[in-house]
């Protein structure tokens, strides 16, 4: 594609020539990545390779030094009202669940809707309850986060992100902080979301999930995308030495 060619209609998240430094550290180097509507992209790579920073630039939790990011055809601005609007199109789920401790589960899922989307309370509550049911924690609606297991809290965090009606969901190691027996209940919710057609970017070390849910695996190392492939090809036949080395350590 030439530089000024129009993006295809189903290109949802487009990064072009994205570069980012933290001081002397060149943490993202010439990142070109296009995520199409409905696609599930799993990002893997060694610790410190820039996976979290990549996610954080997509919803502008981090600024970029060079390049451009667009969401659904609109350039991601550095600040202002338009940024708030675009950011609401990008749901994010972190390793630490980041729920509001002094709000109930239901309130956690209603808050963004009423404050950012200006959804009327009754409507926000109905949507929150529907989503909590969908992620399997409907019966926990009136509890506080600390009363829930880690797996339940993470599912609430997913419901909260979905409540904003995002066009794309970013997951940054959503199961890394969980006890092993709770990992699957969260991955199953994500699998279902993928089957329902949600566009997803998932940073994870769960290779089973990558194999079964991903349309594409993106392998990062030292701030670069080193390799991109469908899961079968990536896991069975990695091309780069760095990917081979990484896989030999984790599989
Ligand atoms: P990953 O998620 O792949 O482990 P990160 O994106 O978190 O990698 O980090 C990439 C590199 O950037 C690491 O060397 C990390 O220490 C550094 N880094 C991340 N965030 C910051 C920050 N806010 N300030 C300075 N360095 C940072
Ligand atoms: Mg990380």
Image: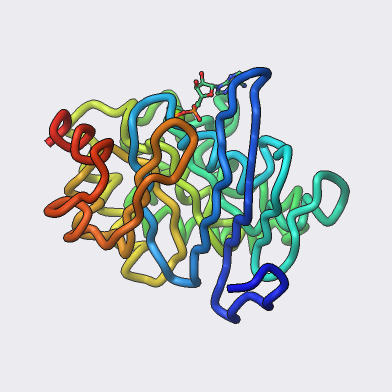
State the residue at coordinates (44%, 31%): 222
The quarter of the image holding the N terminus is: bottom right
Whether residue 190 is visible, yes or no, is: yes
Q: Is residue 172 left or right of residue 228?
A: right
Q: Is residue 89 above or below residue 4?
A: above
Which residue extends farthest bottom? 9
Query: Where in the figure is residue 206, as x and y percent of width and height?
Result: 23, 41
Q: Nearer the viewer, residue 135 or 214?
A: 214
Query: Where in the figure is residue 107, as x and y percent of width and height?
Result: 59, 42
Q: Quadrant of ligand 2?
A: top left
Q: Nearer the viewer, residue 107 or 226?
A: 226
State the residue at coordinates (17%, 51%): 235
Q: Nearer the viewer, residue 150 or 64?
A: 64
State the residue at coordinates (56%, 36%): 28
Which residue extends farthest right? 80
Q: Is residue 188 left or right of residue 30?
A: left
The quarter of the image holding the C terminus is: top left
């Amino acid at each position: 594609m030439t530089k000024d060619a129009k993006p295809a209609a189903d290109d949802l998240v487009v990064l072009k020539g994205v570069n980012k430094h933290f001081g002397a550290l060149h943490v993202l180097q010439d990142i070109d990545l296009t995520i199409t509507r409905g696609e599930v992209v799993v990002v893997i790579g060694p610790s410190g390779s820039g996976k979290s920073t990549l996610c954080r630039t997509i919803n502008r939790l981090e600024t970029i030094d060079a390049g451009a990011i667009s969401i659904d055809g609109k350039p991601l601005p550095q600040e202002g009202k338009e940024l708030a609007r675009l950011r609401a199109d990008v749901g994010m789920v972190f390793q630490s669940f980041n729920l509001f401790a002094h709000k109930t589960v239901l309130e956690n899922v209603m808050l963004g809707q009423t404050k950012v989307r200006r959804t009327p309370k009754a409507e926000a509550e109905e949507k929150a309850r529907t989503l909590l049911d969908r992620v399997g924690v409907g019966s926990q609606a009136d509890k506080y986060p600390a009363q829930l297991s880690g797996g339940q809290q993470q599912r609430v965090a997913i419901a909260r992100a979905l409540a904003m009606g995002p066009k794309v969901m970013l997951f940054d190691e959503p199961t890394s902080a969980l006890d092993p027996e709770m990992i699957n209940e969260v991955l199953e919710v994500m699998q279902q979301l993928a089957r329902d057609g949600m566009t997803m970017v998932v940073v994870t070390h769960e290779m089973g999930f990558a194999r079964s849910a991903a349309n594409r695996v993106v392998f990062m190392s030292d701030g670069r995308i080193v390799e991109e492939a469908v899961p079968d090809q990536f896991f069975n036949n990695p091309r780069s030495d760095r990917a081979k080395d990484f896989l030999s350590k984790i599989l």
